[in-house]
Amino acid sequence: MCFQLAEEERMVQKTARDFARKDIAAVADEANRDGVFREEIYRKLAELGFMGMTMPEEYGGVGFSNLSLTLTLEEISRVCPSTAIAVSVHNSLANYILYKWGSDSLKEKYLPRMTSGEAIGAYALTEPNAGSDVAAISMSAVKDGDDYVLNGSKIFISTGDKAGVIIVIARTNPTGRSRALTAFVVEPDFPGFSIGRVEHKMGMKASTTVELVFQDCRVPASNVIGEEGQGIQIALGSLDGGRIGIAAQSLGIAQTALDETVLFSRERVQFGKRIADFQATRWKIADMGTNLEAARLLVYRAARLRDSGHLCTKEASMAKLFASRIANEAVYDAMQIHGGVGYTEEFKIERFFRDARVLEIYEGTSEIQRIVISKKILEEYEQMYPA
Ligand SMILES: Cc1cc2nc3c(=O)[nH]c(=O)nc-3n(C[C@H](O)[C@H](O)[C@H](O)COP(=O)(O)OP(=O)(O)OC[C@H]3O[C@@H](n4cnc5c(N)ncnc54)[C@H](O)[C@@H]3O)c2cc1C
């Protein structure tokens, strides 16, 4: 890997790798089989600084780079992609939104709890009628005295039932699209908040995915993040980091697919030869390795751009689009090379095959990434060659 990592980033990568291989690996199979979210893992991750990765020390964070966060998510995902979901949402979305747009009092109140691991952060955007089309959000937030009253529901919310801090985007103006949304911090014990349907998913089973129900849920007006009407800006402005997080998760899955393929194909003998010696196997290994390195360059570049303070919307979308695709190709080929045993729970690739599918769906589907990328490319050409 030719990408130059700083000393600190190499250190973070090693710490995450060691923790994932020892502590997460010890519980990953069972947690994914039984669909159990292991809260103790997140407490340990917090002790290592991984729940406040890019936050400054004054709020209990460790002030690492976005690339360090990327490396951490990649290492965790090599062992348990489900575990990486909460780490990504918590750091890239919840912590980031509060830090970038929250008032000083919101930061002081919530960030130390979050960086210490006392409160896991969740991010609630999606609704039954507003998935890709964020501006169609209908959950209402009506000002009433010193509170806002929230009514409606959010679906598919990762860790929504485990979170102590939930960033919720709701509609403060019944008409209009982009300027009508506002971001709030909601705590699970606010009156009128409850957990609804719990999803039973194909993969990522050690991460919970739930519906959040708001029935006359009272949220103090002081819990508005940024300004009223700034919700869409906050929701979309945080997605670059979220998408780099999912791209990092994709790298971890693709790396494990390659590792398992190489190890298995060296052991398995058919027709008197290791299957690693068949050209059909080698071509798959070559493509997996090449795609993985190409994806890694895209993902690390996007994280580096974000660290340098540059807008990285196109690069983050490219990284997510490409890395999530090659991760799915890698698990598909890895299962093929494993033959029948790859389809059983005895082999790790069965779990990774199921986990990989959602990479192309959440944090913006691949179609939405293509819309973002093509829009940016067309804008660049408009600037270079005005009509
Ligand atoms: C396991 C899991 C965890 C999740 N976690 C969270 C979370 O923590 N917080 C949260 O807010 N959400 C979360 N989501 C929701 C997720 O982000 C959405 O599912 C995703 O954005 C897609 O929205 P949708 O499911 O409504 O699909 P839709 O938007 O209905 O899309 C359906 C299909 O139509 C395509 N499509 C839509 N619009 C266009 C267009 N303009 N052009 C071309 N094709 C288009 C899509 O690409 C897709 O193929 C999670 C989802 C899952 C499955």
Image: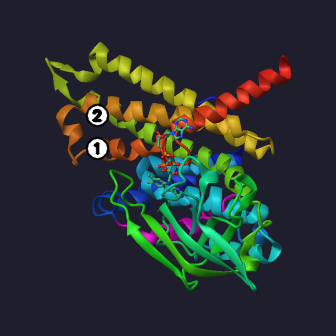
Tag 2, which secondary structure? helix
Tag 1, which secondary structure? helix
**The quarter of the displayed image where residue 27 is located:** bottom left
**Residue 45 on the magenta span:** yes
Q: Can residue 59 be seen here?
A: yes
Residue 196 or residue 89, whichever sits in front: 196
Q: Which residues are magenta?
A: 36-54
Q: Which residue is rendered at x = 42% and y = 72% of the image?
A: 196
Asked whether disc 1 touches disc 2, contact meaning CB atoms under 8 Å apart, the reply is: yes
Q: What amino acid type should be assigned to the residue bearing mark 1? A: Glu
Horizontal and vertical percent position of residue 67:
67, 46
**The quarter of the displayed image where residue 298 is located:** top right
Q: Which residue is rendered at x = 39% and y = 68% of the image?
A: 197
Q: Which residue is rendered at x = 37% and y = 21% of the image?
A: 284
- Is label 1's Cβ within 8 Å of ligand 1? no
Horizontal and vertical percent position of residue 208:
42, 64
Task: Report the residue marked by disc 1.
Answer: 350
Horizontal and vertical percent position of residue 301:
68, 35
Q: How far is disc 1 from disc 2 in space, using C-alphas? A: 7 Å
314 horizontally vs 385: left or right: left
From what the image shows, is residue 88 above or below residue 255?
Answer: below
Task: Report the residue marked by disc 2.
Answer: 335
From what the image shows, is residue 178 above or below residue 158?
Answer: above
**Residue 343 on the magenta span:** no
